[in-house]
Amino acid sequence: MTNREFDVVIYGATGFTGQLVAEYVAQAHGGSELKWAMAGRNLTKLEQVRSAIGAPSDTPLIVADASDPASLEAMCARTKVVLTTVGPYQLHGNELVAACAKTGTDYCDLCGEPAWMRQQIDLHQAEAARTGARIVFSCGFDSIPFDLGVLLLQKHARATNGTPAPRVKGRVRAMEGGFSGGTAASLKATMAAAAKDPKVIGYLTDPFSLTPGFEGPDQPKGLVPHVDDALDSWVAPFIMATINTKNVHRTNHLLGHPYGEDFRYDEMVVTSPGEMGQKAAEMLAKANPLAGDKGPKPGEGPSKAERDAGFYDLLFIGEWPDGRAARFGVKGDRDPGYGSTSRMIAETAILLSERAHDGDGGVWTPGALFGEELAKRLEERAGLTFASE
């Protein structure tokens, strides 16, 4: 890996989110020693993106196509890390993960497709372990803030109460900014796959579908609006909980269950107390922000002003049977689906390129592979904050 031509290749740089990632890297790391390139299907579009984001004119461009495995393998052989924004991954990611696992190339993506992720774990864990490739899924808003939020809450819990919290609640206190067009496309692709294969439904509904060989206790469903006594407020279902909760359980599993084998976790959105809070929670429970033609299409997204005006505020509450509690907050200063996500995946990929291989090949979560190291980097560079409350 030390003699690879590039540290990071951004694959999908001509897409909306991929262009944001490339722009961030060009601006935040342009003067560093980072060796990076942009990749995609169309050379002309790559040249246009390079010009539009103000990247140096000699920034390398690589033509690679998800339908051409040879081009993907050639790309992988040139770089330490492939950062891919080309989704839905279940439609466009199979060959790239296989190529990374084969060539010992590290990989990170924005995947929120748990059935596909489980399939890739089953297919490529052994090969990635053999070659040293670190395959890291879900490196954006789903699921880094939640993955690291629980991990740091549990560190705080052990420091203040002596044991990890057996029950943790993830609560979205506030959020401004929508989900990406890629998220909507991924959800629709997942629903189509589930209609064809009942096994996919099992992966979607099982909280432990990403922990092969381990089944934990029954989990809170997070599907019914109710008053959360810890907040004295109504809470409603959170659409990203389906993927985030699975990644949190996988992190716990990969680390040897430091949260405990009896760990229980859910995620919900906080509305407000009283009748108004109840009405808002019930409306959220019935709504599907990704349904139909709502939201941006893949390749579309909000303006820079809208991205910069976005934010999110997450709370993690650890609870013990005897009434003890601990709280930890995670905040982001950009909209979750684009501004913050593009920075998170970029910094994750660069950190991955800097980390020496140490017999750690395999399929990872960001929390399990990096832990506090990633949280510190995101605070320093990507506009996130992590703090006990």
Image (cartoon, grey):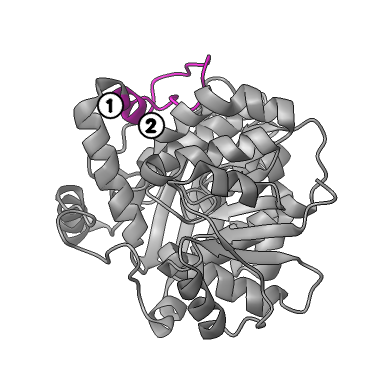
Of the pair 360 and 287, the residue shown nearer to us? 360
Is residue 351 shown left or right of residue 10? right
Q: Earlier in the sequence, mark 1 or mark 2?
A: 2
Is residue 203 shown in magenta? yes
Above or below 78: residue 225: above
Residue 103: image tag: none
Of the pair 223 and 122, the residue shown nearer to us? 122
Q: Amino acid at mark 1?
A: Ile
| Segment colored magenta | 200-219
Is residue 304 shown left or right of residue 145? left
Query: Residue 33 in the image: x percent, y percent?
Result: 81, 70
Residue tagged 2: 115
- Label 1's element? helix
Query: Residue 355 in the image: x percent, y percent?
Result: 79, 48
Is residue 27 shown in magenta? no
Is residue 322 shown left or right of residue 338? right
Within-10-Å neighbours for mark 1: few <14, some 14–19, many 20+: some
Of the pair 58 and 337, the residue shown nearer to us? 58
Residue 201: image tag: 1
User: Which residue occupies 19% across, 52% down?
Assistant: 288
